Image: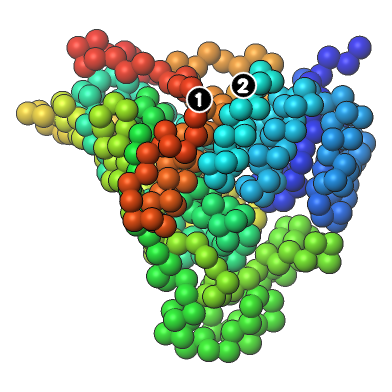
Amino acid sequence: MNSKKRYVQVGLGGRAGMYTHAVMDTYAHCCEMAGFCDNNEGRARMAAERAKAASADVPVYAADDFDRMVEEQKADCVIVTTKDCWHDHYICRAMELGCDAVTEKPLTTDEQKCQRIIDTQRKTGKKCTVTFNYRYAPPATQVKGLLMSGAIGDVLSVEFNWLLDTSHGADYFRRWHRNKENSGGLMVHKATHHFDLVNWWLSAVPESVFAIGQRSFYTPQTAERYGLSNRAERCLDCPESGRCSFHLDLRAHEGMQRLYLDNEDYDGYFRDRCVFSNLIDIEDTMNVVVAYDTGAKMAYSLNAFSPWEGFLVCFNGTEGRLERKEVHSTYVSGDGKTPHQVAQDQSYVRVYPHFKAPYSAEEWTGEGGHGGGDPLLLDDIFSPNPKPDKYLRAADQRSGAYSILTGVAANRSMESGKQIRIADLVENIGMPDYPSMPSPADPIAIT
């Protein structure tokens, strides 16, 4: 009798591989990939070929045959790695068909889709896991441990500045992410990570949001300032390719060519659109103020055209201040480099207690993508016996909802010029499972 947990996966683009390899390789002793589903026949065939190379015969299904795949393959769990705007459909159908769901972040892209997921999970009782790998990055966990220990007392305010550079940041303006109908914009697609980190770090949920933002760099006007007046809508064979610092040649990256360029005829998707196109409708610079149920406030900024990539987050508490600076390696999604490698010589964790000398903490480190978070996340998802975790890093639809709703509220605030209440967007979310925050008088050990 086969006791392995049976997985099927829908969406086989750039972010799918991490989960596919985990099921078919690292956790093959307890997991089995039972089916692939994608709207691009070429990418589906590629996934099947990779499976065959691993001595597995995995059937492929068209997007319209998702229900049939789940039923025929007797799936236990569906891995959702599609475009963000389709997450809600597949998460809900998975649960309605009796499966658990594991979904890439963000949970979904707007409040209506979020409400549907919350309602469906409540109705079916199935498990919905949202993969927030940044929680598992050792430096992020270290920050959580320091806050839990009461190192700076009760957190009163947060300053959080995230910078995307002109390699990784620009890439969001080439892909499907460049349109809010697909991604919810960077406030949802990218900042879901950041908002979730703050929620988890504080063991708090957002109550209200005010935001302003604009697209001020990735514009036709900027292209003109660079003297790029003869641009094409995509990089491939663009007349300005030799002079444009943002040119992306898909042919120079074997993985990108095979995954995207060779499969364009199936769905017409171009991976290398011009970052200065007037068809883009997402912002590249955003500022947000968030109020939390604990009384803490956050000032957050996201810029997508920085000369370096990483972040600086500062917590101001009743007993002092905690700072974490992190500088990340440069990459473009799909170029074969490990994402978000931390430059240790430029990063730090510092505590500034009131009335005492400040000190630096020796940084926690890890191996793998997202600062070492990816392998720990995958173990939590796929291991039959995950290790006990006092930090409660595993996330479900509740954490996923509060994460995206900060960004959704930011989008609504930018549209209306008004402060937006989270409670007015989605009902009956429930409180996520967060660790309690002990008082400074009763610290816990950080291990």
Mark 2 belongs to which amino acid? Arg
Tell me which corner region of the image, top left, top right, bottom left or bottom right, holds residue 200. Answer: top left
Image position of 1 (left or right of 126): right
Secondary-structure class at tag 2 = helix
Residue at 77% across / 66% down in the picture?
Answer: 268
Marked residue nearer the N-terminal end (2 or 1): 2
Secondary-structure class at tag 1 = loop
* Quarter of the image with the N terminus in it: top right
Does the residue at mark 2 contact the one at mark 1 (Cβ under 8 Å)?
A: yes
On the question of residue 160 being in view, the answer is: no
Residue at mark 2 to residue at mark 1: CA–CA distance = 9 Å
As drawn, 94 above or below 109: above
Residue at 82% across / 26% down in the picture?
Answer: 75
Residue at 83% across / 39% down in the picture?
Answer: 66
What is the x, y in percent for residue 175? 62, 62
Image position of 346 (left or right of 177): left
Residue corresponding to mark 2: 122
What is the x, y in percent for residue 340? 50, 47
* Quarter of the image with the C terminus in it: top left
Q: Nearer the viewer, residue 86 or 438?
A: 86
